[in-house]
Image (spheres, rainbow, N blue to C red):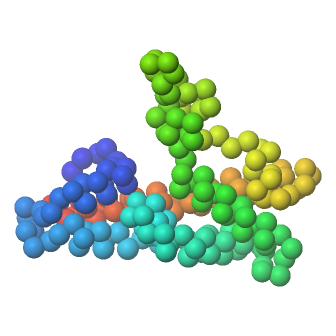
Amino acid sequence: MHNDPLTIEQIVATDLMSTHLESRPHESAIDRIGAFSKGNRLATLLWRWKYANDANCALPALNVLVRIAAKDFGLTGADLEYETLRRACKQALREWRDPQCIECGGTGEVVLEARTIQCDTCDGTSVRRYSDGARQSVLRVSDTEFPLWQKRLGKIAAVITGRCAQLRNQIAQEREKTLH
């Protein structure tokens, strides 16, 4: 058993490329992918949407995330803020699903006159930056409402990353069981 945590990308790549395990020759990669569904509903939908490119999971993931966030913030469908909450959840999902800088395509570098230089747009981080103005525009909130929604957007993003971390840990545990 190794101590280094695997990223979900490494797990997926390993499982998708391998066709069987030595200890269980009848087991295929798709059998192990099915084990990923043991995670919580949101994380499973997010995983399928992002890593299996299953676009049919996007709307259900959004709906589950909206329900979780509405409960966390004490909102109901009757609240005027509910549509703003839905837009905030969409934005958080957009930022989680496609974090790459648009200018450099997520490489952190651009080629300029046959020279490779650090991307100015992301400062070489490879991550797309969203300005407060851009987020406020997407949320359609006033200057006075934006600080509250900025905090909520952070909490929504934390739900996404937390649930995905739980699933990644479950997958790694299942994978360890399968390998031993």
- Specify whether 28 is left or right of 172: left
Q: Residue at x 66, y 63 (%)?
A: 90
Vertical side of 24 occupied by 113: above or below: above
Q: Position of residue 128 (x, y in %)?
A: 60, 41
Q: In which image quadrant can residue 70 be found?
A: bottom right
Q: Where is residue 65 in the image (x, y as percent from the top left)?
A: 62, 70
Q: In which image quadrant can residue 176 be found?
A: bottom left
Q: Which residue is drawn at 31% across and 50% down?
A: 10
Q: Where is residue 174 in the image (x, y as percent from the top left)?
A: 28, 65
- Specify whether 147 is left or right of 9: right
Of residue 156 and residue 131, the one placed in the foreground of this image is 131
**Visible residue check, residue 134:** yes
Q: Please identify the quadrant where the C terminus is shown.
A: bottom left
> How many numbered dots are placed on residues in this image?
0
Q: Residue at x 58, y 73 (%)?
A: 59
Q: In which image quadrant can residue 103 be found?
A: top right
Q: Residue at x 84, y 76 (%)?
A: 79
Q: Where is residue 75 in the image (x, y as percent from the top left)?
A: 78, 74
**Visible residue check, residue 150:** no
Q: Residue furthest bottom?
A: 78
- Specify whether 14 is left or right of 127: left
